[in-house]
Image (spheres, rainbow, N blue to C red):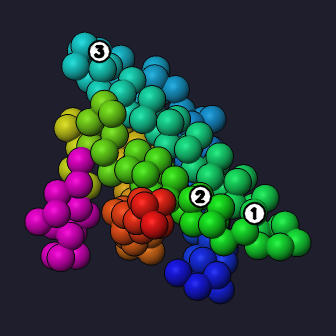
């Protein structure tokens, strides 16, 4: 990929990660398990919220690290195209995948709704409004990142392997 495209993609990716972090961080700072679950919550609801908060914390960390690394790369006097491509690959495989494939499976994406204008995110349990809003709020950001970085899903590593074999 030409370096001008990689630099522009790095800048837009960094901007989207900043937006995601600015939504996730206040939510996680203001909400804890007792605030999300009902007072008479059963074990299944508590497990759901523990998993959801854990997944969102991981997502925040992956996104913050990628945001910082992209910032360092973009501030360098000479733009390192190969390193930036590697970072974009990591954003796709860490941040985007952390959102769409959460470890605790508190929610999932249902592709059947993607083309209907409805929310494609389906929750395992009905969450409180704040939890629902944060997941749906960042879903658009990570959908955009997934679309922008689709090349890095498979083609980037295939290209790298082929270059190594030459």
From the viewer's side, name the closer residue of 99 and 125.
Answer: 99
Query: 10 Å neighbourhood of mark 3: few (<14), some, or many (≥20)?
Result: few
Please name the residue shown 66% across and 78% down the image.
7
Describe residue 90's horizontal placement relative to residue 72 as left or right. Answer: left
Mark 2 and mark 1 in contact? Answer it, CB < 8 Å: yes
Q: Is residue 63 visible?
A: yes
Chief SS of the magenta region:
loop
Seen in the picture, residue 162 relative to 121 is either above or below; the reply is below
* Disc number placed over residue 87 in the picture, else none: 2
Q: Residues within 10 Å of mark 1 (few under 14, many from 20)?
A: some
- The tag on residue 73 is 1
Of pointers 2 and 3, the one earlier in the residue sequence: 3
| Direction from residue 104 to residue 17 in the image, left or right | right
- Which contiguous range is marked in magenta? 108-120
Q: Nearer the viewer, mark 2 or mark 3?
A: 2
Task: Work out whether 131 lies above or below 44.
Answer: below
The answer to if 85 sits in the magenta stretch is no
- Report how far apart the C-alphas of labels 3 and 1 lie in the structure: 49 Å
The answer to whether marks 2 and 3 mark residues whose Cβ atoms lie closer than 8 Å is: no
User: Gap between marks 2 and 1, in whole Å?
Assistant: 9 Å
Q: Which residue is mark 3?
A: 40
**Residue at x-position 24% and y-position 48%:** 108
- Where is the C terminus found, in terms of image quarters? bottom left
Figure quadrant of residue 41: top left
Q: Quarter of the image holding residue 116? A: bottom left
Q: Residue furthest right?
A: 77
Q: Position of residue 17 (x, y in %)?
A: 59, 60
Report the number of numbered marks: 3
């Amino acid at each position: 990929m030409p370096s001008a495209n990689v630099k522009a993609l790095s800048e837009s990716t960094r901007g989207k990660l900043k937006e995601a972090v600015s939504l996730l961080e206040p939510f996680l700072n203001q909400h804890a398990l007792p605030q999300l679950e009902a007072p008479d919550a059963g074990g299944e609801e508590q497990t759901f919220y523990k998993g959801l908060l854990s997944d969102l914390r991981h997502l925040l960390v992956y996104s913050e690290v990628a945001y910082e690394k992209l910032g360092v790369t973009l501030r360098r006097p000479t733009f390192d195209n190969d390193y930036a491509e590697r970072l974009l690959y990591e954003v796709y495989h860490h941040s985007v995948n952390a959102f769409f494939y959460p470890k605790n499976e508190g929610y999932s994406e249902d592709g059947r709704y993607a083309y209907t204008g409805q929310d494609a995110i389906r929750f395992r349990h009905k969450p409180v409004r704040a939890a629902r809003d944060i997941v749906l709020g960042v879903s658009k950001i990570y959908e955009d990142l997934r679309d922008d970085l689709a090349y890095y899903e498979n083609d980037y590593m295939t290209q790298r392997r082929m270059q190594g074999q030459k």
